[in-house]
Image (cartoon, helix red, strand yellow):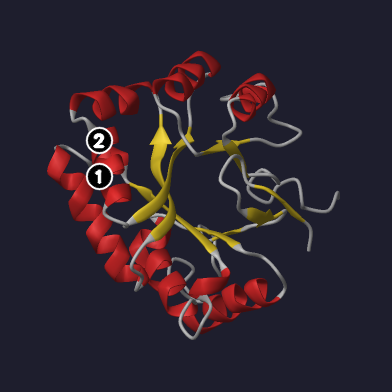
Amino acid sequence: MKYRKFGSTGFKVSALGLGCMRLPTKKLMPLQVDMPKSIKLIKSAVDKGINYLDTAWVYHFGASEKIVGMALQGGYREKVHLVTKSPLFLVNKAEDFDKFLNKQLKKLQIDYIDSYLFHAMNKSGLEKLKKYNLIDKMIEAKKNGKIKYIGFSFHDTLPVFKEVVDFYPWDVVQIQYNYMDTAIQATTEGLKYAAGKGMAVVIMEPLKGGKIGQPAR
């Protein structure tokens, strides 16, 4: 496994991470996660050198975080940089931030989250962040040892991306990017813009949700 510098954090991250939005599901019940197979998959990935795991509150209707937490028992937690996300679209008052964070820590069976991201940041999300002073909630959680690094995942246009990047000295950002999608959302320009500020830039959808990995017919 190859490892790379993770922005300005000092952490060495595996070139490939494991996203837990599409865990194995049961054949006869495709909406239900196959828990044993998923746990085996996560442990196998870590055993092979992957040290970056990504999940979120909404993945698999809430089951993803619980399964990741189960998979990280038995010494696996100490081997990974664990990422999950604050469901910004469900936050309707400042107190909601703490409510979701505390529930996530419990589901994951951990004391702290390595990188905690505002999920699916866009223009309206930025306005909500400002309205409820949610960046202060992030900073407070960091001071209390519940998270290590502060960031956001993104789905909007390049001008909005730059506005969000300039709003706060973020540690990490997650953007949709692949060789078919270099000119949408954050774009190549945005990727370089964030990296130029020392942010760790994480790519989601590198295979366009698996579509690029499909063999040609």
Q: Position of residue 193 (x, y in %)?
A: 62, 21
Is 17 placed left or right of 73 in the picture? right
Q: Residue at x 66, y 71 (%)?
A: 45
Identify whether 205 is placed above or below 103.
above
Q: Residue at x 23, y 60 (%)?
A: 102
Identify whether 75 is placed above or below 4.
below
Residue on which disc 1 sits: 140
* Tag 1 near tag 2, CB within 8 Å: yes
- Please state which amino acid type lies under the numbered disc 1: Glu
Is 13 placed left or right of 112 in the picture? right
- Please state which amino acid type lies under the numbered disc 2: Asp
Q: Position of residue 150 (x, y in %)?
A: 41, 42
- Residue lying at the far right in this picture: please name it: 217
Residue on which disc 2 sits: 136
Q: Residue at x 76, y 34 (%)?
A: 179
Q: Residue at x 29, y 34 (%)?
A: 135
Figure quadrant of the N terminus: bottom right
